Image: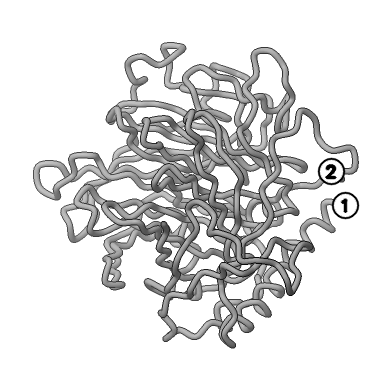
Amino acid sequence: MSRSARSALHRIRPVTALATAATALLGASLLQPATAVAAAPATPAAAAVPLDSLDSLDTEAPTDIAAALDPSDTTAAPPDTTAAPPDTASPTTEKAPAAVGAPTGVSVLSGQWTRPWAITFLPDGKRALVTERRSSTVWLQSKDGTKKKIGTVPNTVYPSPARRVGSGGLMGVAPSPTWNGTTDQDVFFVHTAASDIRVVRMRFNGTSLSGYTVVLGGITRGGDHNGGKIAFGPDGYLYVAVGDALKRNLAQDKNSLNGKILRITKSGAAAPGNPFGTRVYSFGHRNPQGFAWDSRGRLWASEIGESTWDELNLITPGANYGWPTCEGSCGKAGLTDPKKVWHPDQGGVPAQIAIANDVVYVSTLLGQRLWALPIDSTGKNVGTGTSYYKNSYGRLRAIAKVPGANELWLGTTDGGDNKDRILKVTVK
C-alpha cells in the first residue's frame, strides 16, 4: 500500500466509527472483544506490505464521530460476554468467560475537549491534569466530571499543518511526587518549541499555573516522532520518552537524546545510577509515546513502528530496542525484542498505556480500540491480548489509571474541535 493510500485509510476509519457508534445507541454493547494480538515474530510476515504508520492525524479533518454519541448517555454499558472472536462466532457458540482485565463499564466523564494528549493525576489521587496539544492549554479534571482551565505552557509551538508535520505541541505532564500546592508546587511538561523539544517546570498552586523554567532543552525536534510522555518513576526520578525526530540514526547514537527513554533529576541532570552515566536510560526507540510501571516496579512502554510492527516493550536500563536496525522482533544479539507487536492495520498504532492490577491497557490511534494484556506470572511477558471498543469512539490516546480505584480515564482524539471526550472505564 502506498504512503498516500495509507493516509487515505486514516481518513476512512472514522466513518466506520460513526456507524458503529450509532449502532451502539440502538442497544448493542460497546464492549467488543477481538482476537488475540499477535506474538512478536522473529521476522515480519512475508505478505506484509510496507506502510507508513503516520501516527498523527491532526493535519486532516476527521469525520465527526462524537456527534453520533448521545451527550447525555453516561450509563455504563454491560460487557458482551456472548460475543465470540471475529470469524468464529456462530449461533451455537457457548458463552466465553470474560478475559482477564476485561472492562465492565464505560461512561463519559467529560466532553468538549480538543485533542487531549496526556492525563496525569495529582498525588492526592482526586484530580488530574490534562493537556491539550494544539492550544497548549492545561486543565484540572475532577472525578465529578467538572473541569477548569488552569493556564497554558508558554513558548509552545505546534508544527505546521502541512502533511507529515503534525505531531508535537504540548504533550506530557508530570506533577512532582510530593506536590501539595504549597511547599511543593512543581509540575513538569514536555512540549515542542520553535527549534527544540523541552522539558520544563512550572508552578501550580492548586488554582493556576505560573512561571516557566527550562529543565532540559535543545532536544532535536521533528515535525513528527517527538515522543512526549513524561512521568516520575517509583524511584522518584523523572522519565521522558523522546522520539527520533524523523532522524532515525539518532536512535542508536548514545550522545543524542533522541530515540531514547531518559531518566533525569528534577533539575534536568542525569539521574544517579543511569547505565551510561548520562541522561540515557534506554535507546534504539523510534517513537515511544506511553509508559507505566507494574506492581513489581518494572517499566513497560508502547512504541509506534514505521510500517510493519508496532511494539510493547519491557524496558531495562541500558537496553537497545533495535530501531532502525529492527522493527518488531529480529532476534539479534545485543538487541531487545518487544513483548508484543501489532500490525498497524490490525489494531495497532499504540499511543499510551496504563497498568491496573498488572494488566497493561493500551490505547490505539489507527486501531481505534483499547487493548488489555495481562502480565504473566513471571512479570516478564504478557499473555493473550483482547481488544475493546473497536471503532466505537474513534482514535484513542491519553490514558491513566485512577488511583485507588479499578478505573481508567481514556481520552479520545481527533474528533474535531471541542468534540473529544474523556471516558471513564471500569475494569476488573
Is the C terminus in the top left, top right, bottom left or bottom right quadrant?
bottom left
Viewer-closest of 312 and 142: 312
For the image, the number of numbered tags is 2
Please tell me which residue is depicted at 55% across the width and 22% down the height of the picture. Answer: 256
Residue type at tag 1: Met
Residue 94, horizontal then vertical, whole percent: 65, 66
Residue type at tag 2: Pro
Residue 145, horizontal then vertical, whole percent: 31, 72
Q: 291 left or right of 296? A: right
Q: Answer few, some or many: residues within 10 Å of disc 1's Cα (few below 14, many 20 plus, some between 14 and 19).
A: few
Q: Is residue 273 visible?
A: yes
Viewer-closest of 52 and 426: 426
Residue 114, horizontal then vertical, whole percent: 48, 68
How are the colours assigned in the image? one colour
Q: CA distance from mark 2 to mark 1?
A: 7 Å
Task: Tell me the tag on residue 231.
Answer: none
Q: 347 left or right of 419? A: right
Q: 290 left or right of 153? A: right
Q: Are circles 2 and 1 on residues that touch, CB within 8 Å?
A: yes
Give above or below for 210 relative to 132: above
The residue under label 1 is: 1
Decide which of tag 2 and tag 1 comes sooner along the chain. 1
Please tell me which residue is depicted at 88% across the width and 52% down the height of the picture. Answer: 1
Give the secondary structure at mark 2: loop
Viewer-closest of 363 and 232: 363
Residue 249, horizontal then vertical, whole percent: 68, 25
The residue under label 2 is: 50
- Image-quadrant location for residue 369: bottom right
Q: Is residue 221 visible?
A: no
Viewer-closest of 148 and 25: 25
Please tell me which residue is depicted at 30% across the width and 26% down the height of the picture. Answer: 265
Residue found at the very far right of the displayed protein: 47
